[in-house]
Every structure is written in C-alpha cells, then in structure tokens.
Amino acid sequence: MARRFLFSLVAGFWLLTSNSASAEDYLQAEGYALENGLQLLLKPTAEHQHVSIRLIVSVGFDNFSCADKELPHLLEHMLFSGIDQHDEIDLEARMQALGGEWNAYTRDTDTTFVIEAPAKNQRAVLDLLLATLTQSQFTEKKLEAAKKVIEHENGGHYSDLQRLIDQQNLSREANQQLAVELGLACVEKNNVNHLSLAQVEQLQSDWYAPNNMTLIVVGGLDPRLPAYLDRQYGAIPAHDLPQAIELPQVSREAQPRRELITRLVGENASLHWIFPEPWVGDNDYEVWELLSDYIDWKLYETLRIERNLSYGPSSERNVFGSTSFFSLNGTLERGDLDAALSALHELVDGLKRDGLDEKTFLRLQAAAVAKQQWGVQGNSAIADYYWGSLADYDNGRFADPAKRLAKVSFKQANTALQQLLEQPGYIRIEKPLLTANGLYFGLAAMAGLFLLAFFVGRLSKGSS
Ligand SMILES: [Zn+2]
C-alpha cells in the first residue's frame, strides 16, 4: 500500500512538472498499470482547460459467434440506461451538469467510452463513468429499449424478408459480400431479437475486468489524478478472462466476378476489384498504406482525369476475420461500366508490367511522412491516436509512424504490389436492378397487357 501511495505521489509530481517539450511530443506518454491490471495512459498537454478520456474495454464483435455478435453493442447501450434506480435521462443530465459529452463505440476488437470534459471536472466525470460501469442496473424494460435503438441503427427490425434477402446474397456492400462468400463474415445481418438479459450480464462479468481495460486521459491533468485513479479505479476487482474465440479463416471459394443488386431502380453503379493482401513482413501496415496512396493517385489520374468516368475513385483497405483486403473502387454512371472496367484492367496490367513509378512513389511517401507532423492535433485527436495505436506503445513512447513510413523502401513496396496483383482478385459490380428507362418500359408493357386482357375480356363477353 505504501509503495502504491509513493507511486501515485511520484506520478502526480510528474504531471505537475512535466515540461512543455514532452507536452508537445504527442508520441511520449506516461503509461503504467494499477495493481488490478488496469492500464493507464496519461498525457498532459498545453490545452489544459479540457480533458479527453477514452476507456477501452477489450471486447468487441470478434469475441462472439454470428448469432450473438450484437451482444457487446447491446451491453454498450445498456450501460447508458441509468445508474441504480435512475434512468437514462438522469444519467445524461448528470453528465451535462459536469459540462461533459460522452459516447461509446463497439468495434471488432473493443468497446470504447469516449468523453470530452472540462479539466476542472475530470475526477467527477471519471466517477460518473465508473458508476455506469459498476452500478448500472439492467431490467427487461431497459433491454427492450436498447434493442429497439440498435435495430434502428442497423436499419430497422430484422424481418423474415430481410433474412431471406441476406441469405440470397442480395443488398450487401461489395467488400462485405466477398467476406461472406469466403466464410469470413456472417451470412445474416446482426440480429438482437433473441439476446437475453442473462447473456448481457454474463458478458459484463466475463469481460469488463480492469485487467482487460485501458484508460487514456489527455489534456489538463489534475496532479491528484494518479492518486484518485489508484483509489477509485484501482478498487475494481480483477479476474481471469474467458478464452477468446478464433477469428474466421477463409473456408469457402468465392466467384471471381459477381453483379450485386443494390436497389430497384437507378442509374448509378459501382465497381470494385478486391485482392487479399499478402503479408509482406516488416512494416506491413505502412507498405499497404503507402500503396493505397499510390493507387488512389493512379485511379484518380486514370478514371477521373484521363477518362472522366468516375468522380471519386479510391482504394480501400478492409479487415474481415483473419484476412485483410485491398480494393480498387469507383462509383460511376451505369452506362460507363464496361469502359471503366477496361480502364481498370489497363491500369492493373500496366502496374504488373512496369511496377511503381519511383518518382511518384517517393513523392507520395514524403507527403505521407510530412502529414504525420500535423495529422494529430488537439487533446481529442491525441487520445484517439493512442486508442488506435495501443499495440505500438512501449516504454513511455508510441512508435513514430513517420519513421516507419520513411523506412519502407521503393523495392519493398514494388515487390508487395506485384504479389498483390499476381492474384486474380475478385470483381464485384453493384448496380440497381433496373434503369429508369427499363422501369418505364416494364410498366408500359404491363399496362399494355392489362389493356389487352381487358379488351379480350369484353370481346369474349360480347360474343357470348
Ligand atoms: Zn449503437
């Protein structure tokens, strides 16, 4: 206990005396764990009237099988449904009274509570957050209300018709559709109907352990904060975590080319050429980010400037289960689909034949490195950066993204691109079922048939 007190004192002193040089250097942050395993990341900054708080609980959609995928999202909503006997309105009013704003996000690997608040109320705000985590009382009524909100967020009640549409592989985004075909994503859209209160409570007691959480506080830190955190957050009991389930692997084959129906009528279409990203070793993430910049540039040059086919063509990177994908995408007029597809083939063939243009690659790499100097500004952006880069934190510092980007050699990027494009990839075309003309023609034909039936009916009546 004496040791803990001493540590809090030292950490508090550090927050008080931390010089402005380290306040400027956002990659440097004080990180340590409480005895119950809660990881803390504290960063004093010059923007001292305000604090940005992120509480990251390492449980997300990936921890559940298809049927129960929405559980962590449901719990996230339930945690805003009120403390003790009070309701959601009371909870919101308490946060308003402290001048703060909060929200929460459920992602594949985590559920994160995001708070912006005046620095002077930081301990009161953290008290309120702790109370929502430890004193929320769940009822069937609150469960039903949370389910309704999630259904609304997911685009409405999950009906039998929607289930049928999902099973027929209609109306899904191209990347998601490919992931379903390969066995990396769930066939049916996430459904909350059947989830029970007992399941939500089980998830909370299983995964909401301090040894599964990281608390980030950035901004005008109260020197008493470390002692406060030790006393309050340090009192949550730790426990063993359940075994994580395995991420889905590619388990089925997908068609090389498919057309997907987005809606009934329309003139727009989109084109997607999707490739699984091979693992390229050191700085894998940075290699693909730089190639994404390069392909963005080439798509813009080819599809938009030279051929005027697509307004905002772009590359995209997505992760499904254990696999990441790299895609070339463009939204177009439906009539331009064939021209765009052949332009895309020419572009890919050119890249396979000639590789990257060294001058262009180095220019884009220098721009990506330069962007790191101004890309993360303000408490909120720094806190978000820490949230997204926890794996890069070691011994008081986050790995410098600029250095890692600069380390990628032209040769490494070129080889990675060749490995990517030597695969055939998957082409997905999204378009509405009918064009407006097609619809008018269909309606006119139907009207004609009705008229014909009407006259034939009258004629046969007249002759009988
Ligand atoms: Zn939600």
Image (tube, grey):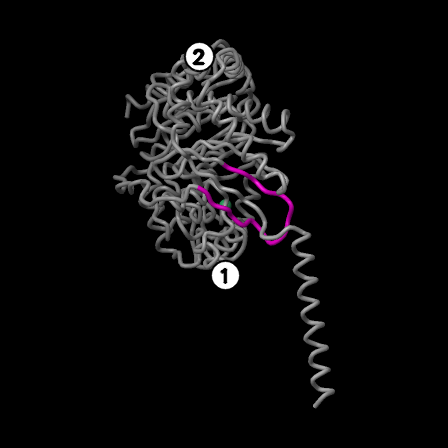
Q: Which residue is mark 1?
A: 161
Label 2 crowding class (10 Å Cα cut-off): few <14, some 14-19, many 20+? some
Mark 2 or mark 1: name the one nearer the start of the chain.
1
Q: Quadrant of the N terminus?
A: top left
- Residue 217 is left or right of residue 457, and the answer is left
Label 1 crowding class (10 Å Cα cut-off): few <14, some 14-19, many 20+? few
In the image, 276 versus 116, the foreground residue is: 276
Secondary structure of residue under mark 2: helix
User: Secondary structure of the magenta portion, mostly?
Assistant: strand
Q: Quadrant of the C terminus?
A: bottom right
Secondary structure of residue under mark 1: helix
Q: Which residue is mark 2?
A: 406
Q: Position of residue 242 (x, y in %)?
A: 27, 42
| Residue drawn at (54%, 19%) of the image | 375
**Please, is residue 29 above or below residue 314 in the view?**
above
Q: Which segment did they paint magenta?
A: 257-272
Amino acid carrying label 2: it is Ala
> Which residue, as the protein is rendered here, is positioned at the far front?
463
* Picture quadrant where residue 31 is located: top left
| Residue drawn at (49%, 60%) of the image | 159
Q: Position of residue 225 (x, y in %)?
A: 44, 25
**Please, is residue 306 above or below residue 456 in the view?**
above
Q: Separation of disc 2 and disc 1 at Cα?
A: 51 Å
